[in-house]
Image (cartoon, coloured by chain):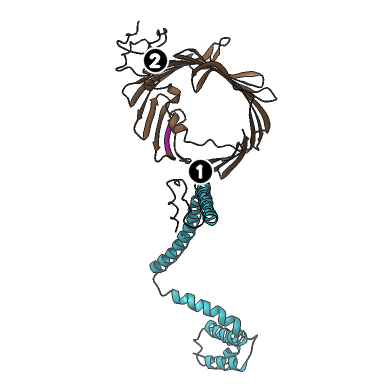
Chain colours: A cyan, B brown
Amino acid sequence: MATLIELPGSDSGVASSEVTPESQDEVRASSADITLPQVPSADTADITDLEDDECSQDLDESLLERVWGLTEMFPDRLRSTCSSTVSTSLNLLKSTYELSRQVVWVAVSSSVILFAPVMFELERLNVEEMMKQDRNRLVFGPGSAVSGPPTPGLMPPPPPAR
Amino acid sequence: MGNVQASGPAPPAPPPPTAAAAAPLPPPAAPEKKEDDNPGPMEDLHKKCKDVFPVMFEGGKFMLNKGLSNHFQVSHTVNFSTIQPPGYRFGATFVGTQQVSPSEAYPVMLGDIDPSGNLNASIIHQLHPSVRAKFVAQIQQSKWQATQLTLDWRGTNHTTSLTLGNVDLVNGSGVAVTHYLQQVTKRLALGTELAYQYGPQVPGGHIAVHSVAGRYTGDNFTASGTLGGTGVHLCYYQKATEHLQFGVELETSLRMQESVASMAYQLEIPKANTVFRGTLDTNWTVGAVMEKKLMPLPFTLALSAMLNHPKNQFRLGCGFIIG
C-alpha cells in the first residue's frame, strides 16, 4: 500500500485542459483515496464545467431529456397503446373528413342537376301568379284578386285574397 | 290453316296471310274495335317506361323545322360539339295520302343527311289494314352501315312481327328476329322472341337466341319484362299524379356480365310550358333534360346536363328549336 505522491498529478491529467481551482480541489479530495477510478471524477468535472459555461442550451436539451425520461416510468404496453390510439384517431378524423367531402359533393351536385331547375320554374310561376294577383287587385280594386288555375301538386295553393 | 270466323256482329276480319304464327286464334269474346285488344308490337313493350327517361345530348344544337305543306316537312339542324365533329344536317319528312285514321297517314318517309353523305332513312308503309312494313337504312362514308326491314301483322289480339337486319346476300350473313305478342287477358300480354343470326363470322355458322316477354298493365302502372338468353330486362312505370311519372329499369346482360339499374322521373308544368325529365343510375350517373316552350312564338329551349361521378365527367347541352 505504498502511496505514490505523484498520483494526484497524474489524476488531473485527463482534465488538464481546464484547470480551475474547483477542479484542483476535487482532484485533491480524490487523491486521498487512490481506489477511486479516474473516469467518474473526470465526468463530474466535465458536467459541472459544461453546466456553468453553456447554461441556456444545456437547460433546453436536458428538459426534453428529462420529460422523455419521465415517460419511461409508464409500462411499455401503455405507451404503445396510447401512441397507436392517438395516431388511429387522427387518421380516422382525416378519412371521415375526406368521406364527408365526397358525400356532400355528390349530394349537392346531383340535387343541382335533378331538382334545381324544377324548383326555379315553380318559384317563378308562383311569383308571376302573385304579381298578376297584385295587378288585378290594383286595377280592379280589392276583392277581385282571383286565384288562377290550380298549381301543380308539389306547391301549396296561393293564399286566398283578403 | 284457317282462322275461326267470328259469329255475330263481329268487325270484318281480314283474311289472314300465311305468316309465321300458325296457331288458330280464339275469336274475340265481344264485338270490340280491333285496336283495343291489340297489344301493339313487341318493340313497344317497354315504351311507356322508356319514354320517361331523358335523352341527354352535348353541345349546342340549333334546329329549324319548317312545314312546307300538309304532307312535307323540312328540318335544318346545326350541331356544335366537342366530342363529335360539328356539322349541319338536313332532314325531310314526307307523309303520304293514304289516311288510315285521323292521326295516322301512310306512307311515311323520313330521312336526314349531312354534307359528307351520311344518311339515315326510313320508310313506313301500311301494305294492308293489318300489315305494316318499315324499312330503315343507314349509309356512312359511302358504305351501307345497317339496313333493317320489319313487317308487323296486327291481329285481333296478337301482333306478329318479322325483322330482317343487315341481310348481305353476297357474304351470306344476316340477322332475322321474329316476335309474337299475345294479349292473354285484358291486362296481361305475353310474348316470345326468337333471334337468329347467320354468317361466316358467327362461331358455328349460325346462332339462335330465344327469350320470353310479358307485360302487365294496372290502373296506374305498367310492369314489363323480358327474360332470355341475352339477359334480363325489367321495366316498371308508374303514374303518380297527372303531371308526375316515374320509371324504373333493370337491365342485365349475360354476355357483358354487367347489370345496370336506373330510375327516372318526368314532371310536366303545363302553366310554365315546361317538361323536366331527370335520371339517376347505379353507374353513379345523374342526368336531366328540361324542355321549355317559349310562348307565344313557336320556340323551344332544351337544356341537358349529365354528370358521371366516378369519371368526373360533365356534359352540358343547350338546344334551341324553332318550329
Is residue B248 shown in magenta? yes
- Residue furthest to the top in view is B1
Which residue is located at x 53 percent, y 90 percent? A30
- Looking at the picture, how far across and down is residue A134, in whole percent? 52, 56
Total labels: the figure holds 2
Q: Where, by quadrant of the figure, is residue B252 drawn?
A: top left
- Looking at the picture, how far across and down is residue A59, in whole percent? 56, 82
- Looking at the picture, how far across and down is residue A57, in whole percent? 60, 81
Which portion, as a residue range, is magenta?
A: B246-254
Above or below, A141 against A48 in this view is above
Q: Residue under circle 1?
A: B271
Marks 1/2 same chain = yes
Helix, strand or loop under label 1 = helix
Q: Please, which chain is the residue tagged with disc 2 on?
A: B
Q: Please, which chain is the residue tagged with disc 1 on?
A: B
Of B224 and B62, the residue lying toward us: B62
Which residue is located at x 42 percent, y 37 percent? B248
**Cα distance in 3D space between marks 1 and 2:** 41 Å
Please indicate whether residue B261 sits to the left or right of residue B114 in the image: left
Q: Amino acid at mark 1?
A: Lys
* Residue B197 showing in the rendered view: no
Of A135 and B224, the residue lying toward us: A135
* Residue B67 showing in the rendered view: yes
